[in-house]
Image (tube, rainbow, N blue to C red):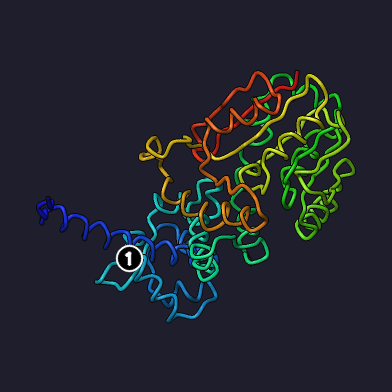
């Protein structure tokens, strides 16, 4: 028997779809504004309004594009417009979440992921039809943007907030121990730790030599002699008991073979040592993620990057939203004990797992 059509529900859903489309396009425009520095430029106006010509001159950009962008931001209720003076204004309350000076609170930087994911849509559609995945090299700027967003979090939290979550590790780092950051990408976390703890030695491990060269250049610029970088597959770590402390930051869920990676970390860690693993804060059950503050965003990024990259290399396709339940189970199966899960009120994106090797 058919279900009676609910006109009110249909109208509400149509409004929802229009809102989604508006917000999706606004997010793309926000990402552009971040890249060309328009939010930062408007913040330099000190909260006053200015015509598009002044904003464009101050930003060093073409006025016609700036004006269209300002109009898009106006109807998105991000920028305010005064029709009497033809002036646009970025309220300070909005600048607090859209400018580079906002640090890890800069949500405009995350908007870049929308267009980056869209850039591989044709390849992804073929994966939906035939399986497989979109490989790492198809993502042109994705990893630069990921380094930007994670770097803001590292600068704000890593040394003073995140590392102290691990029992006794700050004292050990000050005394001098061997540390590895597995899946280090461009190595900013490695260099921050090396700078903060000069008596310890730090090794960044990643399969991308291009990313590691950036880490090496930053280490050289900072004059660090206790930071080095090795190109290796995180799933093939050798040399048992080589490190006293190991870190990974949003790396496990991206792996083709995450279990092999975690097993390798366990083997490479000295007995009694700790592994600090940051990964996406979520439940393993979608029904418990309905109120996740970034749920749609994270599932979308997962499908269009994290999961598909893993599948491109015949991997498990774990996905970013694999969640705390599956993470704890995997870590325990690899042999880790005393698995503690920490969350930080100012970092809604990640859980911080502190795992001990017996």
Quadrant of residue 153 within the rendered picture:
top right
Q: Residues within 10 Å of mark 1 (few under 14, many from 20)?
A: some
Q: Nearer the viewer, residue 39 or 353?
A: 353
SS at circle 1:
helix
Q: Residue at x 79, y 54 (%)?
A: 212
Using the image, determine if residue 322 lies above or below residue 44: above
Quadrant of residue 86 within the rendered picture:
bottom left
The number of numbered discs placed on residues in the rendered structure image is 1
Q: Nearer the viewer, residue 49 or 28?
A: 28
Q: Residue at x 76, y 44 (%)?
A: 234
Q: Nearer the viewer, residue 25 or 52?
A: 25
Q: Position of residue 322 (x, y in %)?
A: 53, 40
Q: Position of residue 165 (x, y in %)?
A: 64, 25
Q: Position of residue 214 (x, y in %)?
A: 77, 57
Q: Nearer the viewer, residue 2 or 174?
A: 2
Q: Position of residue 318 (x, y in %)?
A: 57, 45
Residue that extends furthest to the front in the rendered view of this protein: 1
Q: Is residue 353 left or right of residue 41?
A: right
Using the image, determine if residue 282 lies above or below residue 222: above
Q: Residue at x 36, y 67 (%)?
A: 88
Using the image, determine if residue 181 lies above or below residue 160: below
Q: Is residue 192 left or right of residue 20?
A: right
Using the image, determine if residue 119 lies above or below residue 353: below
Residue pointed to by mark 1: 74
Quadrant of the image for the C terminus?
A: top right
């Amino acid at each position: 028997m058919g279900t009676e059509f609910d006109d009110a529900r249909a109208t509400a859903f149509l409004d929802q779809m229009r809102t989604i489309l508006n917000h999706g396009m606004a997010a793309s425009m926000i990402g552009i504004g971040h890249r060309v520095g328009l939010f930062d430029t408007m913040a330099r106006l000190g909260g006053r309004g200015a015509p598009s010509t002044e904003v464009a001159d101050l930003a060093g950009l073409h006025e016609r594009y700036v004006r269209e962008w300002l109009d898009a931001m106006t109807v998105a209720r991000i920028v305010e417009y005064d029709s009497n003076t033809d002036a646009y204004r970025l309220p300070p309350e909005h600048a607090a979440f859209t400018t580079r000076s906002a640090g890890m609170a800069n949500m405009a930087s995350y908007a870049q992921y929308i267009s980056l994911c869209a850039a591989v849509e044709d390849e992804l559609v073929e994966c939906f039809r035939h399986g497989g995945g979109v490989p790492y090299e198809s993502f042109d700027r994705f990893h630069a943007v990921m380094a930007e967003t994670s770097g803001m979090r590292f600068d704000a939290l890593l040394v003073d907030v995140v590392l102290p979550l691990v029992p006794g590790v700050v004292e050990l780092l000050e005394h001098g121990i061997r540390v590895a950051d597995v899946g280090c990408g461009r190595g900013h976390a490695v260099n921050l730790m090396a700078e903060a703890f000069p008596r310890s030695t730090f090794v960044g491990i990643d399969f991308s030599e291009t990313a590691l060269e950036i880490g090496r250049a930053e280490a050289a610029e900072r004059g660090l002699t206790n930071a080095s970088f090795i190109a290796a597959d995180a799933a093939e770590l050798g040399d048992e008991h080589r490190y006293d402390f190991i870190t990974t930051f949003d790396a496990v869920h991206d792996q083709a073979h995450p279990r092999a990676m975690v097993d390798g970390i366990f083997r490479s860690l000295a007995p009694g040592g700790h592994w600090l693993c940051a990964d996406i804060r979520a439940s393993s059950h979608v029904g418990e993620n309905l109120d996740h503050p970034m749920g749609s965003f994270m599932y979308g990024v997962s499908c269009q990057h994290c999961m598909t990259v893993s599948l491109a290399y015949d991997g498990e396709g774990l996905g970013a939203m694999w969640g705390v339940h599956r993470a704890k189970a995997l870590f325990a199966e690899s042999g880790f004990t005393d698995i503690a899960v920490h969350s930080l009120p100012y970092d809604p994106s990640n859980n911080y797992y502190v795992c001990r090797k017996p």
